[in-house]
Amino acid sequence: MTDAIELIRRQVSNLHQELVRYGLVVWTAGNVSGRVPGEDLFVIKPSGVPYEELTPENMIVCDLDGNVVAGGHSPSSDTAAHAYVYRHLPEVGGVVHTHSTYACAWAARGEAVPCVLTAMADEFGAEIPVGPFALIGDDSIGRGIVETLRGHRSPAVLMKSHGVFTIGKDAKAAVKAAVMCEDVARTVHISRQLGEPLPIAQADIDSLNFRYQNVYGQQPAAR
Amino acid sequence: MTDAIELIRRQVSNLHQELVRYGLVVWTAGNVSGRVPGEDLFVIKPSGVPYEELTPENMIVCDLDGNVVAGGHSPSSDTAAHAYVYRHLPEVGGVVHTHSTYACAWAARGEAVPCVLTAMADEFGAEIPVGPFALIGDDSIGRGIVETLRGHRSPAVLMKSHGVFTIGKDAKAAVKAAVMCEDVARTVHISRQLGEPLPIAQADIDSLNFRYQNVYGQQPAAR
Amino acid sequence: MTDAIELIRRQVSNLHQELVRYGLVVWTAGNVSGRVPGEDLFVIKPSGVPYEELTPENMIVCDLDGNVVAGGHSPSSDTAAHAYVYRHLPEVGGVVHTHSTYACAWAARGEAVPCVLTAMADEFGAEIPVGPFALIGDDSIGRGIVETLRGHRSPAVLMKSHGVFTIGKDAKAAVKAAVMCEDVARTVHISRQLGEPLPIAQADIDSLNFRYQNVYGQQPAAR
Amino acid sequence: MTDAIELIRRQVSNLHQELVRYGLVVWTAGNVSGRVPGEDLFVIKPSGVPYEELTPENMIVCDLDGNVVAGGHSPSSDTAAHAYVYRHLPEVGGVVHTHSTYACAWAARGEAVPCVLTAMADEFGAEIPVGPFALIGDDSIGRGIVETLRGHRSPAVLMKSHGVFTIGKDAKAAVKAAVMCEDVARTVHISRQLGEPLPIAQADIDSLNFRYQNVYGQQPAAR
């Protein structure tokens, strides 16, 4: 086991706690994965194991076809989708999947979340788009994620009638995108309950997004 | 006291904490029971005792007519309904009752939760059905639960103007169903606030449900 | 200081933590009081003190006119309303005031919460009624509470444009009523967002309420 | 480093935990600052640092033009707005910025929160007003805050399509205003979902606000 794998095991295990803390998951219904830098591998949650029982040791290591390389459990049932993303989007270092409430509420109607908050312009730079309805079991979900997000500013996609997938330069960035996705999906939903949110001009969205992705924080922001 | 009874006392006591953790109950308004394998007995919450004071020792053991066999308190006021389910559905090993918010909101209108999320197809395989209005005090509630759930894929029923009952192969599976029931009742409610969720084709619901009940997780999924 | 006063100081101090735990209060905006059995006194929260700094020692003891008898701080700014209730409803041993979200949402429209859940028939036995708009500073609020609740089954009143007051045989029963009031106000609100909840027949409400107030729990239910 | 600076560093660091506790922030998206009494300085959150890693030591000290005077990180990306407020409103000792959900939902529609609750009359004395849409990067946000709040009773402004800024005599008062702003934005939103909240007469708003700002609590209320 290389040091890089150990590091990603620990990161991926810990980041699942952020899904719990921000209320994005119930029972065992969400998962985080992280690419191992310099190797054709990624680390992902075991299937059906409660969040409080996750440890670096019980994380599953897979190759980019989703085959288990190390680990005593089955990998997440969403492993094929994560693997497809890593194979087709080489700049992606982390993937997150959740059924977070408000994002799923938009996904169930097949509606994109419009970009009507400056924080959304910062993080997503556009609407949060909708991907196709796809059944689990083959590459349909992975292909739907990649086709929707390739060339899109948004690191999050609402898969129709299903849930959210987010990507990032590493697993932490993908988790941040999942947290912010639910946050803006909730705020825009609530705003629309009593009327139409005001649009933000495209030039302002562009300018906010450029600034945030380049100057915010102590170092360049994730994706 | 047999070992089997001790085990179920401990499980049932602990599982009540999941109701609290997932916000399904306030004060003393929900309860879990578990059938004792190999005996005509089940273990249930004492009536009116706060969740933080529940221990394996103060759980109540009842026979399948709901008569107390062991325990220093009165059993839950919903004991007759649990007993009826155990008498009439021999494959059921656990029953849960809650007044969780979103499920009750559908129950108050007497409306089933439509199956419009893949997670709902996985867990429930159908809409979450509505059972009859029934008063406490005789077998009306138990009969309403059994008549609604017998032959139905859903492990959850919304009893009209009342609350949720869920069943499972054991108490843990019934608790999981109660958690997922509130989760999908909430997401579908929120989705419908701004329009109609997209339907999922019946063949897709069937396929998702079959797969989830047979291949998901480290071992066969509950119910 | 009598033992009875010490006991009520401790109960009232501890019960404020239930308001926090159930999310009924933010900052310092709610209060609990309890009558001292056998004396013309009650114990109430000090004004403007954070919930985490409340102790039995800093509770304020007042006479039934609301004058401070013991305590180093000013009493809650709602003391006059509590005192009025104790003077005019001798069977009341506890009073709670909150601005809990859903109850206030009904109060802001001046609308009673209709009795459309069996749990609400159990606890409230009727709609949760609306009291008059009243300014703080004299007996208007107290009088509005008493005139609305005297002869009413409900232990909770929604004071118009203001918040909730609940009463009970002791402070714990009044806190339970405040918790259940917010719970049913929330559930009925959410139910009505997507249609009209089904009515429950008056005879069924009567029967549920009679049973619950007389046979539920390990001992007779509060109020 | 003076004692005054040390004190404000500690206060500002600790007060960020209140934003977390009351659910006003996710990830790193809100900030508190406090003016150093007797000096032309204020203390503010470092940019992009998680709330659980904030300490008095890593707070940033700025002059009133927003230049860093002490601190090992970049200051919050909202520093220019805070600085503008301190330069133009000398009575202000604390500023808070959040993207709290319900306040942002009103801000996204560009709608003021009407004063329809007595608690809102107490704290805000008026509607919570809307400020202009303004991009980050120059003084536009600061100017929008000051122009909206100067001469207004409300210590909170909803910046259009963006979020909330609150002011107070010190950082704690500004945090309290942020907590109460979200609380009333939520309650009034929920109330309006099912109809129109009743208006409160202007004379009653005036009287409630005067009383609260002068007699409530153990000492004069903030702002």
Image: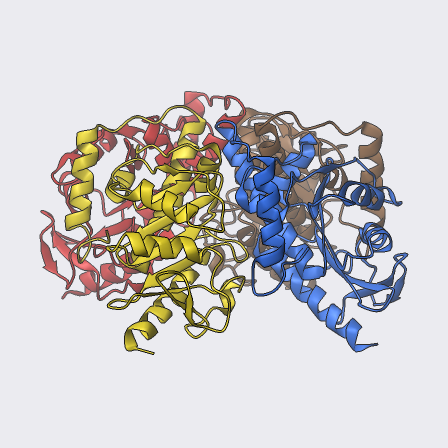
Chain colours: A blue, B brown, C red, D yellow
Q: x, y percentage for residue C100?
A: 36, 42
Q: Is residue D45 above or below residue B167?
A: below
B173 with respect to A21 (left or right): right
**Which residue occupies the foreground of this view, A198 or A46?**
A198
Task: Residue A52: tell me if it is visible.
Answer: no
**Which residue occupies the foreground of this view, D49 or A6?**
D49
Viewport quadrant of the N terminus of chain A: bottom right
User: Which residue is at a point 24% across and 30% down the rendered structure image?
Assistant: C148
**Which residue occupies the foreground of this view, C217 or D193?**
D193
Q: x, y percentage for residue D99?
A: 47, 47
Q: Is residue A47 above or below residue D151?
A: below
- Determine which quarter of the picture holds residue C146: top left
Task: Residue B214: tell me if it is visible.
Answer: yes
User: Which residue is at a point 80% across and 33% down the rendered structure image?
Assistant: B205
Q: Is residue C113 above or below residue D4?
A: above
B183 with respect to A69 (left or right): left
